[in-house]
Amino acid sequence: MSDAGAERDVVIAGAGVVGAAIARELSHFKLRCTLIDGARDVGARTSKANTALLHTGFDAKPGTIESRLVRRGHELLREYAPRAGIPLERTGALLVAWDEPQLHEFAGIVARARANGYAAIREIGIEELYRRERHLGAGARGALEVPDEGIVCPFTTPLAFATEAVLAGCELRLDEPITDIERSADGRLRVHTSAGALTTRFLVNAAGLHSDELDRMLGHDGFTVTPRRGELIVFDKLARGLLQHILLAVPTATTKGVLLAPTVFGNLLLGPTAEDVPDKRDTSSTRAGLSYLRAQGERIMPALGDHEVTAVYAGLRAATEHADYQIAIHAAEGYACVGGIRSTGLSASMAIAEHVRAELGAAGLPLAPKQPRATARMPNIGEASPRPYARAERIAERADYGHIVCFCERVTRGEILDALAAPIPALDLDGLRRRTRVLMGRCQGFFCGAHVAALLADGDRGDGAL
Ligand SMILES: Cc1cc2nc3c(=O)[nH]c(=O)nc-3n(C[C@H](O)[C@H](O)[C@H](O)COP(=O)(O)OP(=O)(O)OC[C@H]3O[C@@H](n4cnc5c(N)ncnc54)[C@H](O)[C@@H]3O)c2cc1C
């Protein structure tokens, strides 16, 4: 299927949600594409550690590329997700003001939403707010409703994009960091990796936190990525009933503030913090960050304090000195920079891909459509979708779907074996987690960890030994 080894039309550096979306978009055309990542899996960096909101872009800075692409990305992902098996829910958001100055910000927020083409935002009264969110902490002064904000699965989304690309013939190279890029005399680019080199006509830099470094390899110097760490707390599923909508904070000049949101897996998520850190690998959680979130959570929803924390994690936004994405197409150089996709890249991913495809077409990349188009149908791991253990027809089809391995998330042996044999297979426990939810429940693998590790070690033999 993939034509590995040949000279490439396009190399996409970075298989996060942005690079995977671009690979999917380009795989619809008769092109020789390679999607390449230094990590062992697709979506294994910032794209796996975010708040997973599907933003409407109501609060983006009007006139920016980000505002346009988030709005369009929302539209595209909402349409694509049900087809591809990506869990997505339109919960709506309530942006809550807790004091008089925050209340005064409302007029500006509504004006900004309208300038971004989003007119459905509206102010609701205190009575309605507390009727709709019965567990909201005391003292709220007012709220804006943003009915189209939603939640989406951050794990399935990049995997679906990359799977579709691979099924359409895109070459996927993992665990192969790009170490250097040079220009050949004929104008092509020579991409050096830990496993050799490949030649390409076009290079797309979707390297997230490292997009500035790749940009410099190509002789540009337009931006520097400073990782902005966001810590988050995941609450147990028993807390889910406390909350109906995403609860947003009134943003300040520097942060969107701490939010409380449901997840598509049936948990509640509190966060994120926003702290610039020097190290691009520093995804540690800190005592100070978690205490800050706890204090914020107590005010937003005091009843949260009675609920167990399932996990904490942190992600790094690829923040730059600029207030917009760093997207630039250098047509004559065969180079597209798609860097600095800070805090809305999951929502905007499909629109970024659409934009990059159009720009590369204008830059001379021949775009002859492939027929028929490959499609990916992913296992839906969202709480709203019945899992195989609860579906008699799936168990009849394969007895392994009736054999639960992870009782917290009700993941079956059949789903684990499927993930090990998928077009982009899980290679480690982290990959299995993101494909099946195994080890992600309230026991965090205490009960089933050894069993899952043995299944992983056995590969996809499915010999019924465990
Ligand atoms: C705390 C937090 C909350 C967020 N909340 C939301 C949200 O609610 N909604 C939303 O839409 N967005 C949100 N985001 C933003 C979103 O997660 C990012 O915009 C998105 O994941 C960026 O994707 P990416 O593909 O650009 O980067 P990444 O996912 O980081 O992918 C870049 C890839 O490039 C690879 N790479 C880097 N250097 C090299 C190299 N030299 N060679 C080969 N490969 C390389 C990396 O291994 C990585 O896999 C949030 C982010 C954070 C941190």
Image: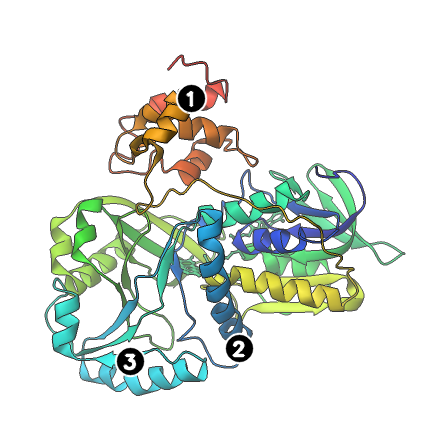
Per the model, the C-alpha gap separating discs 1 and 2 is: 48 Å
Which quarter of the rendering shows the C terminus?
A: top left
Q: Residue at x 38, y 42 (%)?
A: 381
What colouring style does the render use? rainbow
Q: Residues within 10 Å of mark 2 (few under 14, many from 20)?
A: few
Which quarter of the rendering shows the N terminus?
A: top right
Q: Nearer the viewer, residue 114 or 64?
A: 114
Q: Residue at x 45, y 14 (%)?
A: 463
Pointers 1 and 2 in contact (CB under 8 A)? no
Per the model, the C-alpha gap separating discs 1 and 3 is: 51 Å
Find disc 1 in the rendering and name its residue. 455
Per the model, the C-alpha gap separating discs 2 and 3 is: 23 Å
Find disc 2 in the rendering and name its residue. 64
Q: Residues within 10 Å of mark 1 (few under 14, many from 20)?
A: many
Of tags 2 and 3, the one toward the viewer is 3
Asked if 328 appears above or below 202 in the picture, the reply is below
Q: Position of residue 366 (x, y in %)?
A: 78, 59
SS at badge 1? helix
SS at badge 3? strand
Of the numbered discs 2 and 3, the one sitting upstream in the chain is: 2
Give the quadrant of residue 304: bottom left
Q: Position of residue 126 (x, y in %)?
A: 14, 77
Q: Amino acid at mark 1?
A: Leu
Of the numbered discs 1 and 3, the one sitting upstream in the chain is: 3
Q: Residue at x 44, y 75 (%)?
A: 60
